[in-house]
Image (cartoon, coloured by chain):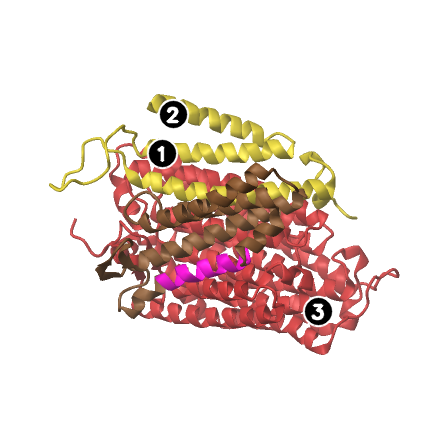
Chain colours: A yellow, B brown, C red
Amino acid sequence: MEVILVIVIGVLYASGLYMILRRSFVKVIIGLIFLGHAANLLIFTVGRISKGIPAFISIEGTLAENAADPLPQALILTAIVIGFGVQAFAIVLFKRAYQTTGTDDLDELNTTDELIQ
Amino acid sequence: MKSSLILATTVKYIIPLLLIFSFFLLLRGHNEPGGGFAGGLVAAAAYALYAIANGVEEAEKFLSIEPLKLFSFGLLTALISALLPLLAGKPFMTGVWLDNKIPVIGKLGTPIIFDVGVYLLVLGVSTKIIFSLAQEEE
Amino acid sequence: MLLVLPIISPFFFAIIMMLFWNNTKAHRIINLVSSAASIIFAVMLFSNVNNSGIQVFQVGSWQAPFGISLVADLLSAIMIVITSVIGFSTAVYSLATIDHEREKFGFYPLLQTLLMGINGAFLTGDIFNLYVWFEVMLISSFVLLALGGRKKQLEGAIKYVTLNLLSSALFLAGVGILYGLAGTLNMADLARKLPLIDNPEMLTLVSMLFLIAFGIKSAVFPLYFWLPASYHTPPAAVSAIFAGLLTKVGVYSLMRVFTLIFINDTDFTHTIILVIAGFTMLSGVLGAASQMDIRKILSFHIISQIGYMIMGLGLYSPLAIAGGIFYIIHHIIVKTNLFLVGGAISKIRGTYQLKKLGGLYKLYPILGLLFLIPALSLAGIPPLSGFWAKFTVVKAGLDLGEFTIVAVSLFVGLLTLFSMTKIWNEAFWKDAPSETIGNKFSGSNTQKAILFLPIVLLALITITIGFYMEPFFDIAQQASEQLLNPNLYIDAVLGVSNE
């Protein structure tokens, strides 16, 4: 299971970075989302993956062996919610920018870098 | 936007169920799956459904309070729940519980108030997003 | 409790403002009250930390390392105080400069949530919580930057948002790996457990992830390109608060993690930081030399000044870090003030283009003087605050025998002076070009007073630090001692343990 996840994380990072380097708005956003997912999955994998072992301390005060660490999953939950908000904002921003500038090519967004002599 | 009669009729029966379910999620949230976030989303889904069936303006009337107000109140409730322990002489954000159990709800304490705040916040934000996106479509 | 106040006070006032969403008059007043209250809380916190050492608060009574700790050592307390001063200045300044359209879309609540995020980042003692505060700060800054929706703003915002989201993703990945290594997120606990792990190479790797993530936020070479693309687009008040505070949160985080957590291989990591510092200074100031827009020149100077602070961290000696901290104090005040002066100029003339400006000294000699104070301080002319800041960093470099970086920093100081004289010559000294757009300040006298009040206030602080630098420097030195002695921090958070 870990091996599969590790491969998935690698693929997500690679495709995320590739997409973020593209010039189209939509692809950049998809790239950002992929990178966020990759980071989340990374934390998920770090917290150990186990099947059917609840991460509770029993009445005798012992934790089942190989139980997954619940904390990273709580972290991911927080990160997902934050990511959701930020990505929603990014999408609206890119849409507004598309409506205002009339282009979806990042290379044409260069009025901020113009030198006025 | 005119939608189908079937959807409008179904929605009438589904919405009370969804809203009750959202409360159920909110109240059981402290010790079992659920909580303010999930509850708020379910409630927002109910209003979104209403908006699809009857149009955004009707849905806004149905909600009868501005989403913005809702989430301000939600934030305020959460903040108050964090400040309440100070009255009990405990540090900021410490969970304070009443000793007696109340039927249905179970133990009452500041984490529940916090969850109510989250519920209102999520409901407010989600409906705000859904309504403004839907209005832009029209 | 004092530790929570800088966070919940702006939060509370932001909520109140949201409840009166359509009443912009109430917004203005509440915003002022909130900013003033922040100053009081910040000063109380600072005197508390100064008198009785590092303050720790365990949120919700969950003991460290299991709960979230809020920690205020001297560095945090200094940053909180400056944040509140800058917050107050911008709150006053925005009364005269922010248009009604922006006020209606919640400019003031956003300003307060931004301050809440910044304060939270300075106070938290938990690395994941730091991520959360970063996001609070970022989302507020995104909206403040894009609010108004002009073409330039949106273009700038896209670059800003994309690169900052990338940095957040890297930061999050770094936090995840760090948790995998040590099984804790509390910074003090991390500092205690990380020296004991099996594979320290991994730690160096993670430290590089953090260096890149915080490097993007603090705009160091070669990760700074979002800054000059976006900082000159929003209104002057927003530019000023961004210029003063946002990048410094990145610098603060770098200082925190590279003095507390990643100190296993300082030869390697801090040398990299030093090299980056040199390039940051140089490329920033060279970028400024080619620009002819006041705010773009100032934006590039932010970058070159960041280099000096990072240089303090990279040299990693008590004096150098004290110099870095002193530099942050000086820089935040001076840079914000320069942006405010720039805003005043555009309020009078209606433009930031140096070619279209001129003759301002004849019309407004006082404004000229008010520009010269922060400008000369930035360039490091004695006896203003910038001189002492540069002097300390350079002295620390000479003590350690790092002559290359010292040479670079002195050269950059010279070029900074050149940039400032360029603005002075073009905007104030030369005759006004014939096709001048505006000529007089349009607005009532009260508006004028509101515009100048924060500028005068910050200029006075600059002069005070310059002529009376000893107490300020003492505090910077104590803060640096605390940073270089992580056990103080660890013991304060986790309690003195016999392990």
Residue position for label 1:
A44
Up-down relation of residue B126 to residue A35 (above or below): below
Looking at the image, residue A99 sits to the left or right of residue C245; the answer is right
Residue located 27% across and 50% down the image: C65
Q: Nearer the viewer, residue C350 or C294?
A: C350
Identified by mark 1, the residue type is Phe
Quarter of the rendering occupied by the N terminus of chain A:
top left
Q: Residues within 10 Å of mark 3 (few under 14, many from 20)?
A: some
Of the two numbered discs 1 and 2 on the same chain, state the one appearing first in sequence.
2
Residue position for label 2:
A5
Q: Which mark is residue C368?
A: 3
Residue located 62% across and 29% down the image: A22
- Magenta stretch containing residue B70, yes or no? yes
> Is label 1 in a helix, a strand or a loop?
helix
| Mark-to-mark CA distance, 2 and 3 | 62 Å
Looking at the image, residue A106 sits to the left or right of residue A16; the answer is right
Residue C128 in sight:
yes
